[in-house]
Image (cartoon, helix red, strand yellow):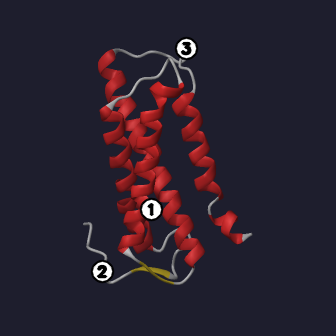
């Protein structure tokens, strides 16, 4: 049961991303072109940074003690980036109102890997009850 508790926020955030990625945008405010490009990409980065962070947080809580290896962090971020890429590829296939965008995939991946940096900063500060978890000796500095 604790396994599901540790990954509950991650799972809920995945569902929110899935919904927002396939929801029609008819009634949403439409900003100007340049505002839309930058704001849209920032939203993508934030969504996947949060997704990656929540997955890493769940893994750290599940592990509870010991060191969290760099490879595990990289795999978690890669999984989140893969989720974003898959959604981006499926949008034009499953809907008639969404289209494929390369820059959305780049923003998704940047956010997913940025989640490692945010997670590591929080881990080093011992915030969020992660005092027992450390980063393995093969983790390279991200300062």
Taking 1 as reference, is 9 left or right?
left
Residue 111 position in % (x across, y down)? 37, 48
Residue 136 picture location, percent across and down: 37, 81
Q: Quadrant of residue 123?
A: bottom left
Q: Residue at 37% of width from left, 37% of height from top?
A: 42
Q: Is residue 139 left or right of residue 49?
A: left
Direction front: furthest residue: 93
Mark nearer the N terminus (2 vs 1): 1
User: How far, Cα to Cα, is label 2 from label 3?
Assistant: 48 Å
Determine the residue positioned at 35% across, 39% down: 105
Residue 129 visible at all: no
Q: Is residue 33 left or right of residue 80?
A: left
Q: Which mark is residue 26?
A: 3
Q: Secondary structure at mark 1?
A: helix
Task: Mark 1: give few (<14), some (14-19) or many (20+) Cα within 10 Å.
Answer: many
In the rendered image, the quadrant that contains the N terminus is: bottom right
Q: Which residue in the protein does label 1 denote?
A: 76
Label 3 vs label 1: CA separation? 34 Å
Report the residue marked by disc 2.
Answer: 138
Answer with the quarter of the image where residue 64 lies: bottom right
């Amino acid at each position: 049961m604790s396994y599901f508790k540790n990954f509950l926020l991650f799972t809920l955030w995945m569902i929110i991303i899935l919904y927002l990625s396939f929801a029609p945008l008819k009634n949403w405010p439409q900003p100007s072109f340049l505002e839309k490009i930058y704001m849209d990409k920032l939203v993508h980065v934030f969504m996947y940074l949060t997704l990656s962070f929540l997955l890493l947080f769940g893994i750290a809580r599940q592990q509870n003690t010991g060191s969290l290896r760099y490879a595990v962090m990289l795999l978690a971020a890669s999984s989140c980036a893969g989720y974003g890429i898959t959604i981006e590829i499926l949008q034009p296939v499953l809907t008639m109102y969404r289209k494929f965008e390369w820059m959305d995939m780049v923003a998704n991946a940047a956010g997913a890997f940025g989640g490692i940096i945010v997670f590591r900063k929080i881990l080093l500060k011992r915030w969020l009850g992660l005092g027992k978890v450390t980063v393995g000796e093969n983790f390279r500095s991200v300062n």
